[in-house]
Amino acid sequence: MSKPQPLSEAEWKVMKIVWERKSCAARDVYQTAAETEGWAPSTVKTLLRRLVEKGHLKTTQVGNSFLYRPARPALKSLFSAADSLLDNALDGTVGPLLAYMAKKSSMTAEELAELRELLDQMAPPSEDDA
């Protein structure tokens, strides 16, 4: 399977709706997007079509309508977006970028502990360890 194309800001919003519902009809996406974003059904239809074309959504026809479901888990899509961001980072900017992301996020105590453990494992040995 080929790697899905990157998502636009609007496409991320539609994907969040579908990921939260796991599987849903187009009208469910229209209603939620109208409430949260003020979007018309035609806008959502265009975004759903693009997401299918890009390989992010799968469809199943049921009568006259379609059910949409994610082609892959949200975390896998987020990892791909992070990979792209890191691939485009300039030398010397990865540390500040990761620090910024950590500050902007709301991590649980468990997630923070996991991050600390990972950072400790990645740290180069100090002179005291030699």
Image: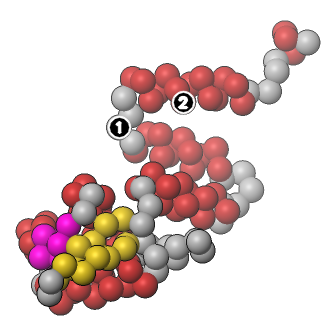
Query: Which residue, given by chain and number where applicable, does mark 2 sit on?
Result: 115
Q: How many other residues sit within 10 Å of disc 2, few (<14), some (14-19) or many (≥20)? A: some
Q: Magenta region, mostly helix, strand or loop? A: helix
Place of residue 118 in the rendered image (x, y in percent of width and height, measured from the top left): 62, 29
Does residue 78 appear in the picture of this structure?
Answer: no
Q: How many other residues sit within 10 Å of disc 1, few (<14), some (14-19) or many (≥20)? A: few
Which numbered disc covers residue 106?
Answer: 1
**Relative to 77, residue 38 above or below:** below
Q: How many marks?
A: 2
User: What is the quadrant of the C terminus in the image?
Assistant: top right
Q: Is residue 18 left or right of residue 89?
A: left
**Relative to 73, residue 64 above or below:** below
Which numbered disc covers residue 12?
Answer: none
Residue at point 25% right, 63% down? 23
**Relative to 4, residue 126 above or below:** above
Which residues are drawn in magenta?
A: 24-30
| Amino acid type indicated by mark 2 | Leu
Q: Is residue 130 magenta?
A: no
Place of residue 19 in the rendered image (x, y in percent of width and height, measured from the top left): 30, 58
Res. 33 image quadrant: bottom left
Residue at point 48% right, 46% down? 101
Residue at point 74% right, 56% down? 91
